Image (tube, coloured by chain):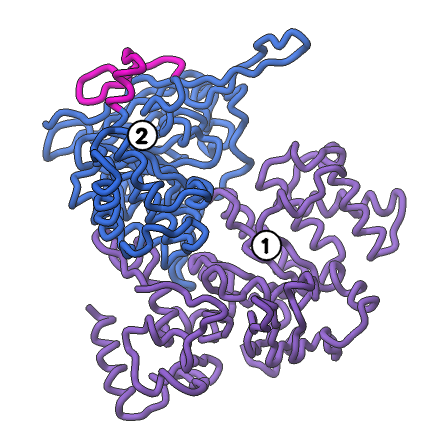
Chain colours: A blue, B purple
Amino acid sequence: MTEALLEVRNLRKYFPIYSGILRQKTADVNAVDGIDFTIYPGDVLGMVGESGSGKSTVGRASIRLIEPTSGEISFLGQNLLEFNKKQLKDVRRNFQMVFQSPYASLNPRKTIGDAIGEGLLYHGLVKNRNEQMDKVAEILTLVGLSPDMIRRYPHQFSGGQQQRICIGRAIAIEPKLIVCDEAVSALDVSVQAQVLNLLAELKHKMGLSYLFISHDLSVIRHLCDRVVVLYLGKVMESASTEELFKNPKHPYTQALLSAIPISHPGEVKNRMILKGEIPSSINPPSGCPFRTRCPYAQPICALTPPKKEIFDPKTGKPDHVYHCILD
Amino acid sequence: MNKEQSLPVLEVRQLKTYFQLERAPYAVVDDISFDLHAGKTLAIVGESGCGKTVTALSILGILPTPPMLYSEGEIIYRGRNLLTISEKEMFKIRGSTIAMIFQDPTNALNPVYTIGNQLLEVVELHLQLHGEEALERVINALKEVGISSPEERLYDYPHQLSGGMKQRIMIAMALICEPDILIADEPTTALDVTIQAQVLDLMRNLQQKNGMSILLITHDMGIVAEIADEVAVMYASQIIEKGPVQEIFQHMAHPYTRALFNSRPGHGAVQGKLHAIKGSVPPLNNYPTGCRFHPRCPYIMEKCKQGVVQNFCIENPSHKAKCWLYDASPESQAKLEYKSMRGKE
């Protein structure tokens, strides 16, 4: 098998809470609590979960935008956590992010030409302003905008166009991995379709990999090769997209899938409506974090759930991993 | 499902709402008519900026002026036109017999009052109940929307509750006066899928129990399939297709409805390219002449570019679409055949 692009092992990120007059640490928010995943070159890894499940923190911590508490991150075999500032600057060329709200992530005082071209100059990919602007014009065409728009400001564009600009900015320095944090969630369905098509097209053209964070299962299903299901900072289940949607094993995944609205009015869906809400990650339940809402919960669930693997008959490798006492 | 059997509780006729934009009036809601039947759910579907929220706010008369200039047409509720009655009379209707829930419960609740306080205000104003009686009513309403230990929750501030809980509080607040009509503006958009399923389930149960009508505003065809009885699709300030939900999903007539439906991931093609609609929604001050969808429409004909498009019936008289494809002329018949061929692919 090819070498992994990004391999994350046992990633943890705790945010301390300080309180009292002495501002002493009283508790931790266990945002990410021991997560493993691997992204191969050209792959799209989907990360799905409800708000508060830690999916955005995973996205940021795995490219060291926030410092993880512990864990291992290896990028093409190099340990990212041992890098100093200088090395980190060089390696960061390989990572970019696209955020949920395109308007909030563009500087309103910068023309889009400057926004897209900034990284090019910073990383020394172009020598001067002329070269920079030529390159930017090229990128604008690539993301489906007209090069004449280069001097415009972000507010002169619609939401979908702004997201194209953000994507243009991300691909400008030719990264290997783009972290898309809810990149299409704020867009209307018809615009969302355009942006998803663009992401798929760019992946082909430039050989990109994505870490695609979303709460929307139909988007994940459309774009991703593999899916990781998160709940309260822990991995519940991970599998190839096809396998996960065909054969969900964890009750939480089953509940998520059953909550997708039906596509035709006559359709009858056997729905599993969960009670209650996601608990706080300050004091997460012991063992399986889902046990407080799980319809099949048993006393044994308070202990760490066993890891179960299903092997792919074709390759003989584990293709589907889940953490649950059920079979 | 006979029209004679269930009389409409709300009739909207030729509603036009004008906004001021660059010193000129523009109709954000342009000639909209629909009926909301007792105990039924009508869904208004469309993309952002198509005027669906403005339609809802016009019914309640809570649009800020400016930018709103004025509304024309008729909104008939209990024999009276809501656009012409006095503010004092409107005050009695708003929040008591026609209630509304908003998209973002965090912004809709007042952060400096406890939720008990905010719920009691509604009861005191509209039901003239006070003290113990009012409190009991509030607690019952909270129980009905599935909030555990409501006596304690009364003393919580909005920030102490999660998004799903806040939306339940909003629903409780809207339903406390047992309204005839509930206007729900994107009630689940800000919520997670599992919580969305809970809230939709709750709305469905409460509707069965109270027999109220729901005017649901959404952009999600999935939610429409879940709870709507009738659908109106809006594009660029107009209703372009309208009909019973089964009819609409079986024979999507207007090219826009079809495009909107097919652009959802996992419905047109599971993997590969999504059927995106080319171009973008036209801005309010620059609507195309003729059919407003014609510059983006794959089945464009010469007559689409000018004049007013009529409503045509599709199969069933209650299913109407604003599209020249259904005028039964030879040209449109040929286009339709081509369209159904493409649909089968």
Residue at image position (59%, 54%) is B203
Task: Say which element carries label 1.
Answer: helix
Above/below status of B330 relative to A148: below
Q: CA distance from mark 2 to mark 1?
A: 35 Å
Q: Chain of mark 1?
A: B
Above/below status of B93 relative to B168: below
Instruction: Using a 10 Å C-alpha cutoff, classify the residue at mark 1 as few (fewer than 14 neighbours), some (14 to 19) or many (20 or more).
Output: some
Q: Amino acid at mark 2?
A: Asp
Above/below status of B73 relative to B182: below
Q: Nearer the viewer, mark 2 or mark 1?
A: 1
Q: Amino acid at mark 1?
A: Met
Residue at image position (25%, 71%) is B343
Mark 1 highlights which residue? B203
Query: In the rendering, at what x and y percent does residue B127 appear?
Result: 84, 56
For residue A327, the mark is 2
Query: In the rendering, at what x and y percent does residue B139 appear?
Result: 76, 42
Q: Chain of mark 2?
A: A
Q: Is residue B115 magenta?
A: no
Above/below status of A54 relative to B39: above
Query: In the rendering, at what x and y percent does residue A142 appear?
Result: 22, 50
Q: Is residue A70 magenta?
A: yes
Which portion, as a residue range, is magenta? Answer: A68-91
In the visual, does A186 lie left or right of A224?
right
In the visual, does B296 lie left or right of A17?
left
Of B263 and A111, nearer the camera is A111
Q: Quadrant of the N terminus of chain A?
A: top left
Of A298 and B211, nearer the camera is B211
Residue at image position (37%, 70%) is B256
Task: Say which element carries label 2.
Answer: loop
